[in-house]
């Protein structure tokens, strides 16, 4: 079956623009996670959904970052008024049992 | 707060050498423990896991034992191959959904 997919795979944007990153989890997975990974570091937790409910958004760095999962499947991470420090790999993962997470390939964001 | 510390890399080994990557953590309670691997150009994937004390996770010749008394989950392999070259992340699941990842240890295996 299909794994977790993310789009776009690469995004280059200018400072101040808004970006939307999409995650399509494995079918049937109720939990969905967003992480940010800087070069040479491990993934850093951003937010988590159980079905459509955002259970924890404590990792979102500031109010320019938001995420939604309106129908309990596809999720979108939105960054408003992007800044250069937002440049990173953004990873999505899904799980069925809240244990093993299956990661997507990531979206590499570059803010110029 | 909860945290994880893993051995800094890069680690460079010759083929068939023994590997140990140390990982220690601090967490409330008894988290599930995971090792994830990221091969060049690919996303993270689960390598192995252990969910309670003294459990041993194993996969692809790698092993790690959940040591509650030392809060450690060291990754070991008796004989590495070139194809094991990757970045390895130790990751305790501290709250049912909030997984904390270590900084990663890059392994290079030379033929």
Image (spheres, coloured by chain):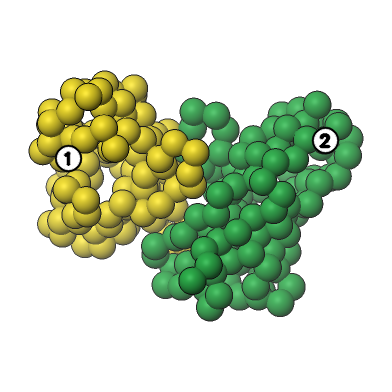
Q: Which residue is mark 1?
A: B76
Question: Is disc 2 placed on a helix, strand or loop?
Answer: strand
Q: Assess disc 2: are there few (<14), some (14-19) or many (≥20) residues with their C-alpha within 10 Å of its C-alpha.
A: some
The chain whose colour is green is: A
Query: Percent from the top left, x then y, of residue A62?
Result: 73, 43
Classify B36 as above or below A97.
above
Q: Tag 1, which secondary structure?
A: strand
* In this picture, residue A61 sits left or right of residue A19: left
Where does label 2 land, which residue? Answer: A13
Residue at 10 percent across and 38 percent down: it is B78
Q: Residues within 10 Å of mark 1 (few under 14, many from 20)?
A: some
Distance from label 2 to label 1 (Cα)? 42 Å
Q: Toward the viewer: B19 or A56?
A: B19
Residue at position x 17%, y 48% from top? B61
Regarding residue A79, the answer to whether it shows in the image is yes
Label number found at residue B42 = none
Q: Height in image: A63 above or below B57?
A: above
Q: Is residue A77 left or right of residue B10?
A: right
Is residue A90 placed above or below A4 in the rendered structure?
above
Question: Which chain's residue wears label 2?
Answer: A
Q: Position of residue A96 (x, y in %)?
A: 46, 73
Give the farthest residue toward the right.
A16
Residue B6 visible in this rendered orientation of the protein: no
- In the image, residue A10 lies at what x, y percent? 70, 41
Against B64, is A71 above or below?
below
Q: Determine the chain carrying the residue at label 1.
A: B
């Amino acid at each position: 079956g299909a794994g977790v997919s993310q789009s776009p795979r690469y995004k280059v944007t200018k400072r101040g623009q808004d970006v939307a990153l999409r995650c399509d989890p494995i079918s049937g997975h109720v939990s969905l996670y967003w992480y940010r990974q800087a070069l040479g570091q491990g993934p850093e937790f951003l937010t988590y959904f159980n079905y459509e409910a955002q259970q924890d958004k404590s990792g979102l760095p500031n109010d320019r970052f938001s995420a939604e999962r309106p129908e309990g499947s596809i999720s979108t991470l939105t960054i408003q008024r992007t800044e250069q420090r937002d440049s990173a790999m953004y990873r999505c993962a899904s799980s069925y049992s809240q244990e093993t997470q299956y990661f997507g390939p990531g979206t590499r964001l570059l803010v110029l | 707060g909860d945290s994880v510390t893993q051995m800094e890399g890069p680690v460079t080994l010759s083929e068939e050498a023994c590997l140990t990557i140390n990982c220690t953590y601090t967490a409330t309670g008894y988290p599930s423990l995971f090792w994830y691997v990221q091969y060049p150009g690919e996303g993270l994937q689960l390598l192995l896991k252990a969910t309670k004390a003294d459990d041993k996770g194993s996969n692809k010749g790698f092993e790690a034992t959940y040591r509650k008394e030392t809060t450690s989950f060291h990754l070991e392999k008796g004989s590495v191959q070139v194809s094991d070259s990757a970045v390895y992340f130790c990751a305790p699941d501290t709250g049912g959904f909030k997984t904390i990842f270590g900084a990663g240890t890059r392994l290079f295996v030379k033929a």
